[in-house]
């Protein structure tokens, strides 16, 4: 019997499709086997490589230090644990910096960057470490990750260095950012840059005279030095808090480096405010002004530096000088010779009264500090008139002009210790060696005589203590007939009224010679039409002083401080004050 073969009559198209499916499955299975084999080999290779790396080689020390630093900065742990880890990081970086082989800039950059960060972070931990700590004794710490034991020393008696116990807070300067286009004064080098905050009274207590509400603020550079006598002994670490204004170099190992510094950071640490809003509130509500009134020393008194006192104008506050101070700090000669103070006052008060307060504060500063190198005043707008009243001998000229036919009667009846008499009769301060007037209305401004001035006068509420201290004789003589017994508020002019071009006070002041070298900076709105110019608020005829040693016209409105040429002129005058006539190398 023969074999019978049955042939199915499939269409050719179907046969072709089945054969394609078969070939695809065959290829997919081959690819799958190859993929599995490749994955397995790769996994074994990576696993073997990792096991070899973990048991054999280790990442470079500097890379490990940088990773540890990043982890320490990110995770908030116990201050002593953080300090021990930061010491390990700084020690590794210091070893790389002091390595004689690492002589090129590219080799030094990475360890210096890591060292500076660790030094700043460690110094910022000092206030936390200080709780219950005697800074005269070393603190023993152990790094739990490496097992290293450190003895960290805080005490220092060298000139140009601060004791760790001096500051209640140390702020990392890297966290203080300048605004866009704000000038900064930063010196590259070795060391962690910080701002040291010192308060002479507990936080929240009213500060004493001259001290800012948040405490004095100074630039600080932290350095950590390491020594170890024997491998079995703890590693000695010494934290140094250096004043970069007095030192410009430091040694790490046997190599000498420039000391890093951030001179702008103390200014930036005072924060930012809405300058226009604060100035407005301080003008109309002087009794409840925001900020510390009077003379303020942001960094405390330094007898080796000449005080430069910034005096703001109407509708303003000391923050208007921020950019000017930042720009001037860029010059090492300015930093070496001057320190900046500010005078803050309610600008709605009679500026003759504000000038009295500045005069009293200067006398107190002279009594307390014994200032012997002179004082430079820089006054903006109405602040310039406040400064002018520090360098003139009034005699009775202002008094007679202010009270006219009743001047003699009032003079004989008002006590000499009355603020009214002391604000209008005064002597020039011999401690003031130079004055810079910026957009100052020496002869007033007609702008305050219109509806703008009237509305502003209506808004201003003078402090009640001014009325309480008005002598009865003055109220009796000057008040209108049939007036009630209380002192009429019309007796006291606001600063707006005193700034009028018809002001008797300004007319009298214009007759008195200025008893100190002085300079003028005036805006002309870029029109170049002086002496017929105006800055939009004060005409040139009011700002100009024939007795000025120099006069700089800048193409701005009533805010010439926004122009770099005005700041450069201030810098030139400050250097001239020390006999420096050429621009120093920066």
Image: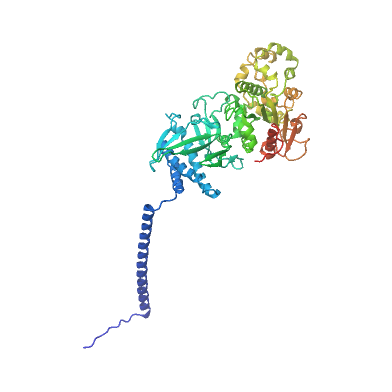
Quarter of the image with the C terminus is top right
Q: Position of residue 476 (x, y in %)?
A: 67, 12
Q: Nearer the viewer, residue 568 or 262?
A: 262
Q: Is residue 510 left or right of residue 253?
A: right
Q: Is residue 236 left or right of residue 535?
A: left
Q: Is residue 62 above or below residue 41?
A: above
Please tell me in which quadrant of the rendered image residue 558 appears: top right
Q: Nearer the viewer, residue 570 or 420?
A: 570
Quick one: which residue is furthest to the bottom in this view? 1
- Give me the residue at 47% from left, 42% from top: 90
Quick one: which residue is furthest to the top in this view? 413
Q: Is residue 285 visible?
A: no
Labels in figure, total: 0
Quarter of the image with the N terminus is bottom left
Q: Position of residue 568 (x, y in %)?
A: 68, 38
Quick one: which residue is furthest to the left in this view? 1
Q: Nearer the viewer, residue 578 or 96?
A: 96
Q: Position of residue 38 (x, y in %)?
A: 37, 64
Please tell me in which quadrant of the rendered image residue 132 appears: top left
Q: Position of residue 276 (x, y in %)?
A: 61, 34
Q: Is residue 61 left or right of residue 23?
A: right
What colour-coding does the image apply? Answer: rainbow
Q: Is residue 419 visible?
A: yes
Q: Nearer the viewer, residue 327 or 330?
A: 330
Please tell me in which quadrant of the rendered image residue 229 appears: top left
């Amino acid at each position: 019997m023969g074999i019978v073969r049955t042939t199915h009559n499939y269409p050719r198209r179907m046969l072709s499709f089945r054969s394609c499916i078969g070939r695809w499955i065959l290829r997919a299975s081959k690819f799958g086997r190859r993929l599995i084999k490749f994955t397995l080999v790769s996994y074994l290779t990576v696993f073997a490589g990792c096991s070899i790396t973990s048991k054999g080689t280790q990442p470079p020390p500097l890379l490990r230090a940088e990773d540890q630093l990043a982890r320490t900065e990110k995770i908030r742990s116990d201050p002593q644990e953080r300090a021990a880890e930061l010491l390990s990081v700084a020690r590794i970086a210091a070893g790389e910096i002091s390595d004689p082989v690492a002589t090129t800039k590219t080799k030094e950059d990475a360890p210096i960057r890591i060292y500076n960060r660790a030094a700043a972070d460690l110094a910022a931990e000092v206030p936390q470490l200080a709780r219950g700590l005697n800074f005269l004794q070393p603190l023993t710490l152990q790094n739990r990750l490496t097992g290293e034991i450190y003895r960290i020393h805080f005490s220092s008696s060298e000139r140009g260095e601060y004791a760790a116990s001096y500051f209640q807070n140390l702020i990392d300067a890297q966290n203080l950012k300048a605004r866009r286009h704000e000038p900064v004064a930063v010196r590259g080098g070795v060391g962690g840059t910080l701002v040291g905050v010192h308060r002479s009274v507990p936080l929240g207590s009213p500060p004493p005279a001259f001290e800012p509400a948040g405490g004095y603020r100074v630039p600080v550079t932290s350095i950590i030095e390491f020594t170890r006598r024997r491998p079995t002994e703890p590693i000695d670490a010494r934290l140094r808090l250096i004043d970069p204004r007095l030192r410009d170099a430091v040694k790490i190992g046997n190599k000498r480096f420039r000391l890093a510094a951030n001179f702008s950071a103390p200014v930036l640490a005072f924060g930012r405010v809405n300058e226009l809003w604060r100035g407005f509130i301080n003008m109309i509500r002087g009794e409840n002004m925001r900020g510390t009134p009077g003379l303020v020393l942001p960094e405390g008194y330094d007898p080796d530096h000449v005080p430069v006192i910034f005096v703001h104008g109407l509708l303003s506050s000391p923050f208007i000088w921020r950019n000017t101070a930042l720009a001037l700090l860029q010059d090492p000669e300015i930093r070496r010779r001057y320190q900046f103070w500010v005078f803050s006052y309610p600008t709605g008060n009679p500026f003759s009264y504000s000038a009295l307060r500045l005069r009293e504060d200067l006398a107190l500063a002279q009594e307390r500090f014994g200032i012997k190198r002179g004082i430079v005043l820089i006054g903006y707008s109405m602040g310039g008139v406040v400064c002018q009243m520090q360098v003139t001998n009034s005699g009775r000229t202002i008094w007679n002009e202010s009270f006219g036919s009743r001047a003699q009667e009032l003079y004989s009846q008002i006590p000499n210790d009355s603020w009214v008499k002391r604000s209008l009769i005064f002597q020039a301060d011999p401690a003031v060696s130079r004055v810079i007037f910026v957009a100052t209305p020496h002869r007033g401004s007609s702008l305050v005589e219109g509806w703008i001035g009237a509305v502003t006068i209506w808004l201003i509420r003078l402090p009640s203590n001014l009325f309480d201290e008005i002598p009865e004789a003055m109220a009796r003589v000057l008040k209108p007939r049939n007036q009630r017994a209380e002192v009429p508020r019309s007796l006291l002019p606001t600063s707006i009224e005193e700034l009028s071009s018809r002001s008797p006070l300004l007319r009298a002041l214009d007759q008195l010679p200025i008893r100190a070298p002085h300079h003028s900076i005036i805006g002309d709105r870029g029109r170049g039409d002086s002496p017929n110019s105006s800055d939009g608020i004060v005409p040139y005829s009011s700002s100009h002083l024939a007795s000025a040693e120099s006069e700089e016209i800048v193409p701005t409105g009533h805010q010439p401080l926004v122009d770099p040429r005005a700041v450069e002129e201030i810098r030139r005058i400050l250097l001239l004050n020390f006999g420096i006539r050429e621009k120093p190398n920066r």
